[in-house]
């Protein structure tokens, strides 16, 4: 399979059968299938208003497959909200005070949440979801 840099929207087939000849969408069973599906979907992202009807249908199918796999992965990992928050803190080099700023609250709230002394509220989940580009409900497990 070609690398992501090789594919460009302007060069993608306009018809559904041509798109399927290039990359046949299938249920995603592993990380390789996931990566390939995301790679192709990324080519279309941002071009929604320039796509043909066939390209829109194809892109929607890829997104549905990716979302289904993401839901399955989230269920199987049973990642608790606090564990997710700690992971995100590590990945983005964020401190407890940074979380307080994200939440728009006092500087002590973020560290207290990370220590497990305070629970996340629905409003906190919305703020974190917007900041990290995730659905708020992932922070409420």
Image (cartoon, rainbow, N blue to C red):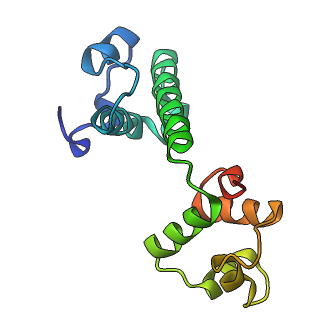
Task: Say left or right for 15 vs 121.
Answer: left
Task: Establish if 5 lies above or below 15.
Answer: below
Where residue 75 appears, as percent x and y from the top left, is 56, 40
On screen, residue 12 versus residue 125, left or right, reads left
Quadrant in the rendering for residue 74: top right
Residue at screen point 46% across, 75% down: 90
Q: How many marks?
A: 0
Give the quarter of the figure containing the N terminus. Answer: top left
Q: Nearer the viewer, residue 33 or 18?
A: 33
| Residue 100 placement: quadrant | bottom right
Residue 67 in picture, x, y percent from top left: 53, 34
Q: At 27% across and 36% down in the image, what residue appears?
A: 32
For this view, does 23 lie left or right of residue 141? Answer: left
Closer-to-camera residue (71/23): 71
Q: Quadrant of residue 62?
A: top left
Find the residue positioned furthest to the left: 1
Q: Nearer the viewer, residue 12 or 34?
A: 34
Q: Image height check: is 33 above or below 134? A: above
The quadrant the C terminus occupies is bottom right
Q: Residue at x 66, y 50 (%)?
A: 135
In the image, residue 23 lies at what x, y percent? 29, 22
Q: Residue furthest top?
A: 17
Measured as percent of width and height from the top left, residue 112 is found at 71, 83
Which residue does the image show at 63% across and 77% down from the upper left? 114
User: Observer-nearest residue: 52 or 41?
Assistant: 41
Q: Is residue 110 above or below residue 47?
A: below
């Amino acid at each position: 399979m070609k690398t992501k840099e090789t594919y460009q929207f302007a060069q993608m087939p306009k018809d559904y059968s041509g798109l399927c000849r290039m990359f046949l969408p299938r249920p995603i069973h592993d990380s390789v299938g996931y990566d390939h599906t995301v790679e192709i979907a990324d080519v279309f992202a941002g071009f929604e208003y320039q796509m043909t009807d066939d390209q829109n249908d194809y892109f929607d199918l890829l997104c549905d497959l990716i979302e289904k796999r993401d839901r399955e992965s989230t269920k199987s990992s049973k990642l608790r909200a606090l564990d997710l928050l700690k992971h995100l803190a590590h990945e983005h080099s964020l401190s407890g005070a940074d979380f307080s700023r994200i939440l728009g609250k006092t500087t002590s709230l973020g560290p207290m949440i990370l220590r497990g002394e305070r629970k996340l509220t629905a409003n906190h989940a919305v703020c974190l979801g917007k900041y990290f580009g995730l659905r708020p409900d992932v922070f409420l497990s």
